Image (tube, helix red, strand yellow):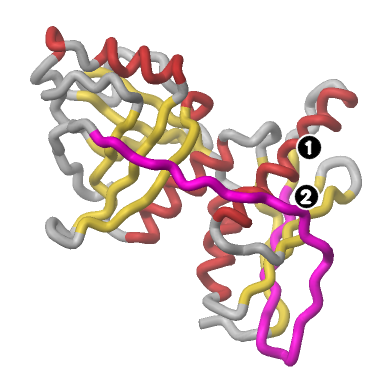
Amino acid sequence: MKKLKNIILTLFVVILASFSFSACDFFVLQNGRSGVVYAVYQMNVSEDYNVLLQRKEATKDRMKNYLISLGFTQNTIAIEGEDRLRVEVATDGDQYAVKRLLKDMGEPSDFSIRLDSIYGEDIGITGRNITALRGYFDSVFETYFVRIFLDSVGTTRFANATLPKNFERLISFVSITGGIEQEISRPRIQTHITNGRIIISGFESEIEMNRFINQIISGQFETRLTLIETGARGGRER
């Protein structure tokens, strides 16, 4: 991040959208209008075989469900060999944007919240405590922000971190990718937040915001993914 933006933490009541997931058969290109963007990932295979098999299948399912939630209903995901995951996404839109999405998924991130600074006390919330992320654009302030929804454990820990005794202290939101820590924003605590909903600002573009969301989602997968290759066939790249 080139610039950190301080914001006031406030309470939000958000109604979560629900998605209906369904399996998708292999697709074919129709009338030459659509294209297919693909990616091949390496999966972490340093685990017991039976446990790994379950984790690979779970990763495959979660990737499919995430793509469907983004509107990419025509997708094919297959496990190849012992440690490869192949993803194909049909699109008649911006192939470059889909490539960027698939690249992000191959660079998973962890998440951390710390008091005072990036080097401060870790309050014990990770990406595993996140149940949903939603990106938005605020047309009034012309800024991008992400709403994070925490599970019950994360909600309790965040409520403890934002108790009145900590008012005016800074709180640092950090992403960790490949061992490199990056501070996203560092607002000042001014509200006791007990509903497990967090607003993170400080994103300079929609691409940057989406990258953060995609990488945190990928970091929650049961098996870590590393991008090996990506490409496209048919259609056009805008």
Residue 37 % position (x, y) = 67, 70
Task: Identify the residue at image location x=53%, y=72%.
Answer: 96
Residue at mark 2: 85
Label 1: element kind: helix
Q: Amino acid at mark 1?
A: Lys
Q: Which residue is mark 1?
A: 56
Horizontally, residue 81 falls left or right of residue 183, namely right
| Amino acid at circle 2 | Leu
Q: Is residue 175 above or below residue 209?
A: above
Look at the numbered discs 1 and 2 and tell me whether their residues touch, using CB distance below 8 Å: yes
Q: Is residue 30 above or below residue 154?
A: below
Name the N-terminal-most of marks 1 and 2.
1
Between 119 and 125, the one nearer to me in the picture: 125
The answer to whether residue 151 is above or below residue 237 is above
Residue 216, above or below 193:
below
Residue 106 is situated, as x and y percent measured from the top left of the image, at 61, 49
* Label placed on residue 142: none
